[in-house]
Image: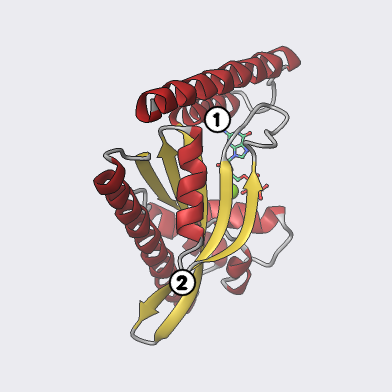
């Protein structure tokens, strides 16, 4: 997991001023989000293991996690015109991020349902970019959930952004992201159209693979 290092901490130090107290607060708040990532990851792994033991099949291909860097948090606070302080950080719901890459489209909804119906999980927000893909062709199921973490001082509810997608959707999103990152100002209309076309081809392959999987598992 990318938990960022000392230089990132120096970043927040310089962007927030030299308040030592603020840095200490930041460290403790960062630990809460790391704990939330662990809780959600464990829940997902348990579901995947159980699925395997019942159905002899793993719905999850892999799980990636990330903790938003202080620098990105600062950028987001600026984007939403929020004060650059620790209180405003509770407004940012994607500090803890978990990406679940599934084998098939139906696995996405199975995992989402099994996770969000757990008694200690609250679903705050859902965006289904699979049923309603973004204009550029981006597909994924996005959930903002809260999960309790148990600290010596008591229980706290921490938000986690969960992105669930297939291997094929992940393939497209990774490449589209790196292409856009390389050339953020000059992504021409032609490039956007070609990327959108790729997303559509990939989506139809996803559907076909799902059908093949079903015919083998149920047939
Ligand atoms: P932001 O986090 O500021 O983007 O807020 P939002 O509420 O508009 O987020 P949304 O749920 O639409 O997307 C959040 C995350 O999904 C992004 O940070 C990316 O990781 C991913 N994402 C969204 N759209 C795209 C896209 O077009 N391409 C790729 N590669 N990833 C995307
Ligand atoms: Mg985000």
For the C terminus, which image quadrant?
top left
- What x and y, as percent, mark residue 151? 36, 80
Extreme residue in the bottom direction: 153
Extreme residue in the front direction: 219
Mark 1 neighbour class, 10 Å CA radius: few under 14, some 14 to 19, many 20 or more: few
In the image, the residue with mark 2 has its CB under 8 Å from the nearest atom of ligand 1: no
Q: CA distance from mark 1 to mark 2?
A: 33 Å
The vertical placement of 110 against 154, above or below, is above
Mark 2 neighbour class, 10 Å CA radius: few under 14, some 14 to 19, many 20 or more: few
Q: Quadrant of residue 83?
A: bottom right
Which quarter of the frame holds ligand 1? top right
- Compare residues 116 and 23 and report the one nearer the observer: 116
Which residue is painted at 55% across and 30% down in the image? 177
Q: Secondary structure at mark 2?
A: loop
Which residue is painted at 30% across and 38% down in the image? 57
- Compare residues 14 and 145 and report the one nearer the observer: 145
- What x and y, as percent, mark residue 102? 42, 37
- Compare residues 192 and 39 and report the one nearer the observer: 39
Which residue is painted at 56% across and 71% down in the image? 86
The vertical placement of 140 against 75, above or below, is above
User: What residue is pinned by disc 1?
Assistant: 177
Q: Quadrant of residue 118?
A: bottom left
Q: Mark 1 or 2, which is nearer the eye?
A: 2
**Label pair 1/2, CB-CB below 8 angstroms:** no
**Is tag 1's residue or tag 2's residue first in the polypeptide sequence?**
2
User: What residue is pinned by disc 2?
Assistant: 120
């Amino acid at each position: 997991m990318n938990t960022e290092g000392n230089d990132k901490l120096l970043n927040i130090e310089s962007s927030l001023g030299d308040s030592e107290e603020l840095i200490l607060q930041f460290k403790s708040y960062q630990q809460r989000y790391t704990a939330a990532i662990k809780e959600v990851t464990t829940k997902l792994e348990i579901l995947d293991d159980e699925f395997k033991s019942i159905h002899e099949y793993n719905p999850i291909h892999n799980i990636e996690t990330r903790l938003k860097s202080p620098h990105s948090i600062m950028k987001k606070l600026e984007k939403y015109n929020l004060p650059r302080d620790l209180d405003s950080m509770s407004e940012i719901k994607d500090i803890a991020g978990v990406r679940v890459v599934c084998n098939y489209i139906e696995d996405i909804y199975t995992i989402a349902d099994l996770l969000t119906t757990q008694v200690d999980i609250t679903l705050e927000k859902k965006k289904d970019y699979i049923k309603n893909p973004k204009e550029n062709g981006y597909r994924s199921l996005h959930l903002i959930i809260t999960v309790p973490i148990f600290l010596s001082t008591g229980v706290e509810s921490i938000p986690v952004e969960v992105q669930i997608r297939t291997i094929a959707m992940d393939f497209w999103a990774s490449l589209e992201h790196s292409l856009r990152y390389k050339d953020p100002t000059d992504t021409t209309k032609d490039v956007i159209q070609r990327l959108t076309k790729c997303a559509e081809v990939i989506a139809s392959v996803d559907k076909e693979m799902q059908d093949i999987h079903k015919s083998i598992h149920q047939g």
